[in-house]
Amino acid sequence: MDIAALITLCLAAFAALAAGLVSICRQLAFLLGARRAQARVASEWRYRRYGRERRYYRVEFTLSTGQRAELRSAWSSSPSSAPKVGQQVVVLVNEQPGQAPKARIGSWAELWLGSALLLALGGIGTLALVFVGGPISRGGL
């Protein structure tokens, strides 16, 4: 592995790590101002990918102003693990004066999966570069 490839991998790993940390900070800032609201799964969209059935769902909830709102799940899931149509789910809503309300479905996957994937990718990449890049940069391997 030449030094240019090592630098490119290093930058990609650090970028993923930084993006994961920024994502976690943004999520925590959202959670600090959010309130819990009950929502109802209103509909679903099923599809097959790589031979496996996947599912997105749409929830409906009410804002503190009484206005009805809806939200689609950000991550697809297997039909067995996702809530069913008509089932109640928790939605986290952040309503700031003068801004459009922001809402997220209150499941682990919806809140943390993206951040966890970025942190894992960046962390594994960084560790690989430390163990592989160290000997290469010192003339080993």
Image: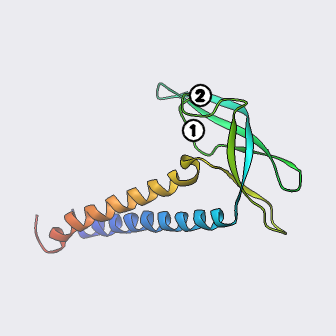
Q: Which residue is mark 1?
A: 76
Q: Which mark is residue 47?
A: 2
Tag nearer the camera, 2 or 1: 1
* Residue sitting at the far top: 51
Q: Residue 28: give x, y in percent of width and height.
A: 58, 65
Mark 2, other Cα within 10 Å: few <14 / some 14–19 / many ≥20:
few
Q: Residue 49: give x, y in percent of width and height.
A: 51, 30
Residue type, mark 1 in image:
Ser
The reply, left or right, for residue 35 in relation to residue 17 is right
In the foreground, 25 or 137: 25
Residue at 58% across, 53% down:
111
Quarter-of-image position of residue 33: bottom right
Q: Residue 14: give x, y in percent of width and height.
A: 39, 68
Q: Residue 63: give x, y in percent of width and height.
A: 82, 53
Residue type, mark 2 in image:
Tyr
**How is the rendered protein coloured?**
rainbow
